[in-house]
Amino acid sequence: MSEIYSRKVTMNQSLSMQQVLKLYHFAKDYNGYIYFIERHKKIALSSLPKLVSYFLTSKDKHTFKIVIEGTETNEAFDALHTIYSSRSTITAFTTSTLNNSMESRS
């Protein structure tokens, strides 16, 4: 069953390019969709140009929502969090589950 998982994350300082690449590779390998939402913009982690641009133009201390759509979303978030945990603070989270029969109608 697919889930949608989101957490509000505050970055205390910008990520290194190595960390950005790790986020990108994780998102490319994940069986689902992972993105950030900040100021009504959606940044897909599977798009390296958008991801790099986002971190190059963001301020050191900024807040965004990370959204994970797919299976095993809690585990996916934990794996992502290990990549950037030294530079962030988690403030809130929500999880919801989608019914697979509803998804197949789209």
Image: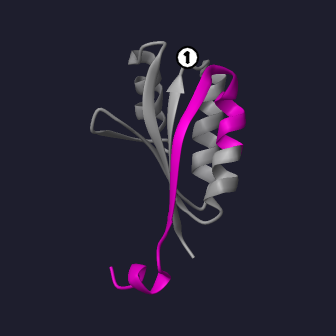
Neighbours of disc 1 within 10 Å: few (<14), some (14-19), many (20+): some
Query: Is residue 19 rendered magenta in the image?
Result: no
In the foreground, 9 or 40: 9
**The C terminus sits in image quarter:** bottom left
Q: Is residue 11 left or right of residue 103?
A: right
Question: Where is 85 relative to 27, above or below?
Answer: above
In the foreground, 52 or 89: 89
In the current view of this chain or complex, which residue is farthest to the front? 92
- Asked which quadrant contains residue 57, the reply is top left
The residue that disc 1 covers is 12
- Asked which quadrant contains residue 41, the reply is top left
Query: Is residue 83 rendered magenta in the image?
Result: yes
Mark 1 residue type: Asn
Residue at x 61%, y 58% (from the top left corner): 73
Report the label total.
Answer: 1
Residue at x 48%, y 12% (from the top left corner): 60
> Which stretch is magenta?
79-106
Q: Element at badge 1? A: loop
In the current view of this chain or complex, which residue is farthest to the left? 40
Q: Is residue 61 left or right of residue 40?
A: right
Residue at x 55%, y 14% (from the top left corner): 13
**Where residue 53 sits: x, y (%)?**
41, 24
Colour theme: one colour
**Where residue 25 sits: x, y (%)?**
63, 42
In the foreground, 75 or 28: 75
Question: Where is 90 relative to 28, above or below?
Answer: above
**Where residue 1 sits: x, y (%)?**
57, 76
**Where residue 28 sits: x, y (%)?**
58, 49
